[in-house]
Image: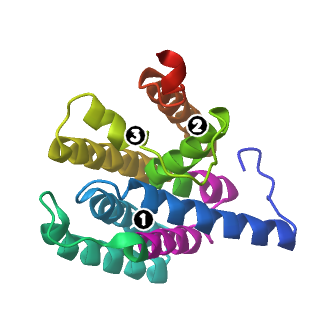
Amino acid sequence: NPFGQEIQFWPWVSMIGTILWYAILMNGINMIDGLDGLAAGIVAITCITLGAISVDLGQPLAAVLALIGAAACFGFLPFNFNPATIFMGDAGSLLLGFLLASITLLSSSKAPALLTLLIPVLAVALPLFETLFAFVRRILRGQNPFAGDRSHLHHRFLDLGFSVRRTVLIFYYFTAYLGVTAYVLQRLDSRSTILVAILIAIGLLLLANSMGYLRDKSAAR
């Protein structure tokens, strides 16, 4: 961590945290699989980021898995991009989420404690953001947090008048930006990493607020 002490968790805390990490990422990719090519493209870009970070951290297995994931998604995208002719479905999106969770854990296993906690989170910030804010939004509205709705971030862009293709491309650019940021941060000192991570978190909160992501639509009427 930034103060030079080693962070250790009890085995049961690590086990629960690992299970939650898999569950959150698997559901996150499943949630963003709402537009043609969205999930596949985001996972492809994220895999490139995680692959580059894994190479820097000396994690060949994670790098190979990331390369395979990126190649699979890029091979699938021509058939899944709008207008799509093939869809991955729940089985595909959950598998991609499982892959990302595995790569992040493998790539950060030999990293300093702070990098272990922050860099993977930043690399997969978009599906992570989608999952956590969907749960918070539904709980605040008194809804079942596991029930589906049409208030996901990509739906907000469509409601603003963006086309499906433009919305998907915006998400690609945003994912690439987060990926480059994550790659640069893992080369910086711990205090700089914390500062930038806090600024990004504030930015995500402002984005959520500006798009009414947490507000109740019925209350707004």
Q: Indicate yes or no whether the magenta region holds residue 134.
A: no
**Sequence-earlier tag: 3 or 2:** 2
Of helix, strand and loop, which one carries label 2?
helix
Chief secondary structure of the magenta span? helix
Q: Position of residue 93 (x, y in %)?
A: 40, 69
Q: Residue at x 19, y 76 (%)?
A: 75
Rounded to the nearest whole Å, what is the CA distance between mark 1 and mark 3? 23 Å
Q: Residues within 10 Å of mark 2 (few under 14, many from 20)?
A: some
Q: In screen coordinates, is 83 left or right of 18?
A: left
Of helix, strand and loop, which one carries label 3?
helix
Q: Position of residue 129 (x, y in %)?
A: 51, 45
Check disc 3 and report the residue beneath it. 153
Q: In screen coordinates, is 154 left or right of 144?
A: left
Check disc 2 and report the residue beneath it. 137
Q: Is residue 5 above or below residue 103?
A: above
Check disc 1 and report the residue beneath it. 50
Callout 3 amino acid:
Leu
Of helix, strand and loop, which one carries label 1?
helix
**Nearer the camera: disc 1 or disc 3:** 3
Q: Is residue 45 visible?
A: yes
Callout 2 amino acid:
Arg
Magenta stretch in the rendered image: 93-118
Whether residues under marks 1 and 3 lie with C-beta atoms below 8 angstroms apart, the answer is no
